């Protein structure tokens, strides 16, 4: 038996890039002495190089592992939700639908302070799309102070895996119903969660 099922695997790199661009908060995983170190941080995809660009606090224990040629695993998470059998037109069991992108790659350190600053500006410009209400200027004095506490890095991607579990094995009407449920649940659950927590 093949796992994961082929119909839940998306090999289209453009689809995976779209997930990265839309949900840039990544889970970055390194291994030290057989123990995983995990950090959640935004990574942006550089169209010109095909690399991921990021920054990490120098005091984060994982920072010391982000040296040249060190292997890393990266996970990007798209929308996800529980799918009740009640939404289907056919008899089904409960399941969970989700979109994930798993990447493996090698790190390249960015040590030059001007290059780190440039990558921070580039990341801010990307994250401020489409309105660009804030522009991080190169001469921003706060950035000059923060740059000494930041490690910059790029990740050269060596392996792509798209996990798009979206009820693809169901009838067209049920696939459409699952899609609508994913949209509705994600819109409602965020508001409900924030009301409870904050």
Image (spheres, helix red, strand yellow):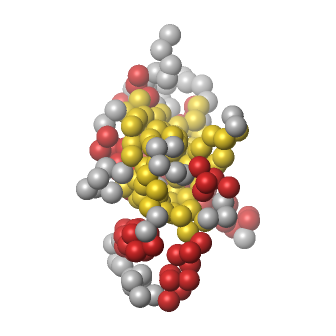
Q: Tell me the residue at 70%/37% (across/down).
A: 33
Q: Does residue 128 appear in the picture of this structure?
A: no
Q: At which x and y percent is residue 48?
A: 25, 56
Q: Nearer the viewer, residue 117 or 97?
A: 117
Q: At which x and y percent is residue 131?
A: 35, 77
Q: Nearer the viewer, residue 103 or 1?
A: 103
Q: Does residue 83 appear in the picture of this structure?
A: yes
Q: Quadrant of the C terminus?
A: bottom right
Q: Tell me the residue at 48%/14% (across/down).
A: 2
Q: At which x and y percent is residue 193?
A: 67, 60
Q: How many marks?
A: 0
Q: Tell me the residue at 42%/58% (across/down).
A: 53
Q: Tell me the residue at 39%/85% (across/down).
A: 137
Quarter location, residue 162? top left
* Vertical relation: 7 (above or below) 57: above
Q: Nearer the viewer, residue 35 or 86?
A: 35
Q: At which x and y percent is residue 19?
A: 41, 49
Q: Is residue 11 left or right of residue 1?
A: left
Q: Nearer the viewer, residue 174 or 71?
A: 71
Which residue is most to the top?
Answer: 1
* Vertical relation: 169 (above or below) 21: above
* Vertical relation: 124 (above or below) 43: below
Which residue is most to the left?
Answer: 48
């Amino acid at each position: 038996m093949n796992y994961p099922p082929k119909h839940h695997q998306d090999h289209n790199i453009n689809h995976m890039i779209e997930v990265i661009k839309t949900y840039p908060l990544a889970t970055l995983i390194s291994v030290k002495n057989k123990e995983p170190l995990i950090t959640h941080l935004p990574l942006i995809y550089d169209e010109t190089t095909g690399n991921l660009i990021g920054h990490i606090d120098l005091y984060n224990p994982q920072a010391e592992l982000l040296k040249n040629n060190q292997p890393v695993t990266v996970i990007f998470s798209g929308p996800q939700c529980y799918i009740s059998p009640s939404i289907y037109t056919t008899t089904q069991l409960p399941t969970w639908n989700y979109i994930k992108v798993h990447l493996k790659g090698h790190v390249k350190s960015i040590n030059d302070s001007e290059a780190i600053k440039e990558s921070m500006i580039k990341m801010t410009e990307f994250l401020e799309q489409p309105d660009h209400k804030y522009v991080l200027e190169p001469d921003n004095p706060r950035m000059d102070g923060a740059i000494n506490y930041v490690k910059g890095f790029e990740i050269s991607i060596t392996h792509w895996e798209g996990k798009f579990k979206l009820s693809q094995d169901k009838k067209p009407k049920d696939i459409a119903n699952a899609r609508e449920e994913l949209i509705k649940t994600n819109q409602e659950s965020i508001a409900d969660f924030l009301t409870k927590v904050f």
